[in-house]
């Protein structure tokens, strides 16, 4: 109910301010599990996807965002829950597995799960090598993967900006990718790598970003 209310109130306001140009939204399957795999340009990307995707999209969110105290903390938890965030622990060795398990749970329920295969937002504007979690989810659940490219969100909230700024946003949904031909092979690292690379190629075509074949690293972070 709250999710519907937020979409009815925030979506028109966001369209008025940012005038998003959305193409291919009809390519998101109307029913069944779907992995929405997007490039990541800014902190506002999740909000943008939540407001323009025809179905509710579930995303992972830091568990501590849901445990704040007082009126502000409860309001934040309610807002994030309405926008589709799923709380997950971070910062320990089991966090990655917990994140994937939450994704499987969402997809098993026939819902849409949003993920950024790069793992973090791109600070240099390029599209970086994808982590194979996106492939593991698709192969384990049989979900279709819809690549989606975000353009302009890096101008809405540049790195270091605390508040969004008015800027034109464009969202392009690609054709659903079906990996059912690999059914039963999800344990193969080579298959997961190949599926991930296919998804990243689709994102490169949609976004027009330069692709670099290494994982994104934050400034000062050593190469893996």
Image: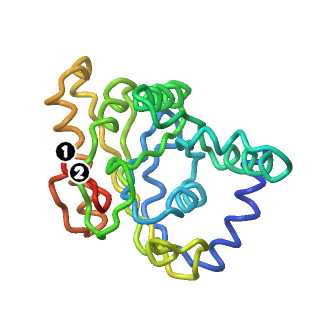
Residue 37 locus on image (x, y percent): 38, 48
Instruction: Say whether residue 83 is left or right of residue 204.
Output: right
Residue located at (71% from left, 65% from top): 10
Instruction: Say whether residue 135 is left or right of residue 86.
Output: left
Quadrant housing the C terminus: top left
Residue 5 locus on image (x, y percent): 78, 54
Front residue of 178/133: it is 133
Q: Dots 1 and 2: beta carbons under 8 Å?
A: yes
Q: Residues within 10 Å of mark 2 (few under 14, many from 20)?
A: some
Front residue of 209/112: it is 209
Q: Nearer the viewer, mark 1 or mark 2?
A: 1
Q: Kindly state the secondary structure of the residue where label 1 is placed.
A: loop
Instruction: Say whether residue 37 is left or right of residue 185.
Output: right
Residue located at (26% from left, 47% from top): 130
The residue carrying mark 1 is: 224
Q: Is residue 41 above or below residue 26?
A: below
Front residue of 65/10: it is 65
Tell me which colouring the rendered structure shows: rainbow
> Mark 1 or mark 2, which has the lower sequence index?
2
Front residue of 141/217: it is 217
């Amino acid at each position: 109910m709250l999710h519907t209310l937020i979409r009815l109130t925030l979506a028109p306001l966001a369209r008025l301010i940012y005038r998003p140009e959305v193409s291919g939204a009809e390519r998101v399957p109307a029913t069944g599990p779907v992995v929405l795999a997007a490039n990541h340009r800014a902190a506002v990307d999740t909000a943008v996807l939540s407001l323009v995707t025809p179905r509710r999209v579930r995303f992972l969110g830091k568990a501590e965002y849901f445990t704040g105290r007082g009126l502000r903390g409860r309001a934040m938890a309610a807002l994030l829950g309405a926008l589709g965030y799923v709380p997950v622990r971070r910062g320990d060795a089991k966090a990655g597995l917990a994140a994937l398990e939450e994704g499987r749970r969402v997809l098993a329920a026939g819902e849409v799960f949003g993920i950024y295969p790069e793992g973090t937002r791109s600070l240099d504007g390029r599209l970086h090598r994808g982590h194979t979690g996106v492939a593991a989810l698709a192969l384990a659940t049989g979900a279709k993967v819809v690549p989606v490219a975000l353009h302009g969100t890096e101008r809405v909230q540049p790195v270091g900006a605390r508040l969004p700024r008015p800027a034109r946003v464009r969202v392009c949904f690609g054709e659903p990718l079906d990996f059912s031909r690999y059914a039963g092979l999800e344990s193969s690292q080579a298959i997961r790598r190949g599926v991930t690379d296919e998804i990243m190629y689709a994102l490169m075509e949609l976004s027009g970003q330069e692709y670099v074949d290494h994982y994104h690293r934050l400034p000062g972070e050593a190469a893996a």
